[in-house]
Amino acid sequence: MPLFWLIVTPIAIVVAVITLVDVFRRRQGGWLTAGWVVAVLILPIVGSLIYWATRRYSPDEADEAYLAEADMRRESANRFYDV
């Protein structure tokens, strides 16, 4: 059983840190940020999963993702025709 915890603990820490960085980066408001921080610190894996499942994308993030996908399609088409 110690091997299990040796593997799961670093993964939980990394997921919690990534989630906390995203919570603070998005600047959602004081109480909402505090709630997410408490949830992630008390239950790192469950709190993080709930955060990522309920997280809404901002319009800037949606535009950025759309432009990145369009750029990838354009590069793929260019590679196809260059052959």
Image: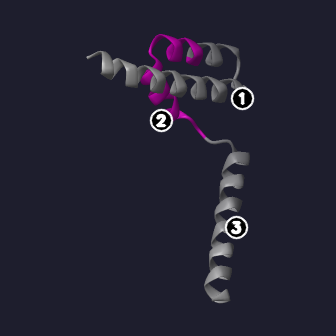
Q: Residue 57 vs residue 12: left or right?
A: right
- SS class, disc 2: helix
Image position, residue 58 (x, y; %): 68, 42
Q: Residue at x 63, y 89 (%)?
A: 83
10 up-or-down from 34: above or below = below
Disc 3 vs disc 2: which is toward the camera?
A: 3
Read off the residue under disc 2: 53
User: In front: mark 1 or mark 2?
Assistant: 1
N-term-proximal mark, 3 vs 2: 2
Stretch in magenta: 36-56
Give the spatial CA distance, label 1 vs label 2.
Answer: 17 Å
- Label 3 environment density (alpha carbons within 10 Å; few <14, some 14–19, many ≥20): few
Secondary structure beneath dot 1 equals: helix
Find residue 25 and name its label. Answer: 1
Task: Say which residue label 3 marks.
Answer: 71
Kind of residue sitting beneath label 1: Arg
**Please, which residue is most extreme toward the left here?**
1
